[in-house]
Image: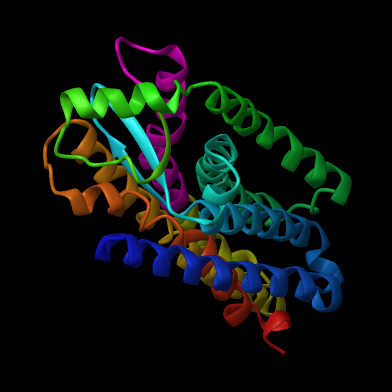
Amino acid sequence: MTVLDVISIVIHSSTGIIGIIGNIAILAAIKFKSPKNLKSYSILLANCALIDIVACASTSLTIERMIAFTDVTANIYLGPCSFVSGMFCHVLHSVMLQTNTHSLFLIVIAFCYRYYVIGRQAPSPLKVKALCIVIYIPTLIVVMIGLFINDSSESVREAFRIHHPDHELDNYVLEGHVDVGIRLSSVIIQIYMIVPVIPLLVIVFVVIRKLKEREEVMTTKTKEMHKSLVKVLSFQASLPIFFFLSTFCYVLVKRKICNFIVLEYAITWFHPFMPSLAPLITLFNVKPFKK
C-alpha cells in the first residue's frame, strides 16, 4: 500500500462518515423541526439528503483510484467492497458516480423551486415527490448502462501489462474496460456527467440574481426566511467546484495532458466533499434546523 493509497482511504472514509452523519441529521431536522410553510421544500431537502447518503456510503465502500487512459480504463478499489468482489465494487462505483452527478441536478432544482414559489402557492407535497421521481429516471438509466460497460478484469490487467507496463496492478482488485473503439455506453455516461456541469452552474447563478431581484416584493417576515434559504443555496452553489475539479483531473489523465500518478487518485479525491459538506451548510444556516 502506497502513501497515495493511504491518503485516498483517509479522504474517502472521513468525508463518507461526516456526510452520512450530517445527512441523517438533516432527515431528523426535517422530521422534527421543519415548519409547515416549508413542507414541500423539505421534501426536496429530504430527497437531497437520501441521495447524498447513498453517494457517501458508496464512496466510502469503494475508495477508488481511477486510471483513465485513451486505450484502457481501470478502477482500482481500496475499500471494503474489495473483500466481496470486483463486480460488487463496480456496482457501487456506478451508483457513486451517478448519485454525485444527480446531486448537481438537485442543486439546480432547489434554486428553481425557490424562484417558482415567490408570489405563487407552493406545489403540493405529492407534486414535489413526483418531480423527484421523474428527475431521477435519467440517472437510473445511466446507472444501468454503467453496470454493463466492463470487460473482464484479466483483459484489463493484460492491456496494462502491454501498453502501460509502468503500472503494477496485480496486487489490486480492479474492474474496467479496454477501449478498442468508440463505445456508445461510455460516450453516454461521459456526456451525462461532464457536459451539464457548466450549463448547470450558469443556470444557478442566473437564478441567484433573479432571486435577489424579487426580494423587493416580499413582506419582512417572508424576506427573512427567503434570505436564509438563498444564503444556503448560494453556499451550495459553490459545491459543484469539487465535481468540476474531479472532472478536470479526469480529462487531464484521459487526454494524456498530464501523466502524474497523483492525478489518477485526485480524480476521486474531490467529489466526496460535495455530499459531505452539503448537509452542514443546511444545518448551520437554516434557522429552524439550527435550534
**Side (left or right) of 76 relative to 143:** left
As for residue 185 lying within the magenta part, the answer is yes
Q: Can residue 227 be seen in the rendering of this structure?
A: no
**Side (left or right) of 24 relative to 15:** right
Residue 140: quadrant of the picture? top right
Q: Can residue 10 be seen in the rendering of this structure?
A: yes
Q: Position of residue 190 (x, y in %)?
A: 40, 28
Q: Residue at x 29, y 11 (%)?
A: 180
Residue 69 or residue 210, whichever sits in front:
69
Q: Residue at x 17, y 24 (%)?
A: 163
Quadrant where the C terminus is found in the figure: bottom right
Quadrant where the N terminus is found in the figure: bottom left
Q: Residue at x 52, y 41 (%)?
A: 93
Q: Is residue 12 above or below residue 289?
A: above
**Side (left or right) of 125 relative to 264:** right
Residue 203: quadrant of the picture? top left
Q: Position of residue 201 (x, y in %)?
A: 41, 47
Residue 161: quadrant of the picture? top left
Q: What is the tally of numbered marks visible in this picture? A: 0
Pick out the residue farthest to the top.
Answer: 181
Q: Is residue 30 above or below residue 241?
A: below
Figure coloring = rainbow
- Residues in magenta? 178-206
Q: Position of residue 256 (x, y in %)?
A: 14, 33
Q: Position of residue 139 (x, y in %)?
A: 60, 33
- The rendered magenta stretch, by its main secondary structure, is classed as helix
Q: Is residue 249 above or below residue 220?
A: above
Residue 288 or residue 216, whichever sits in front:
288
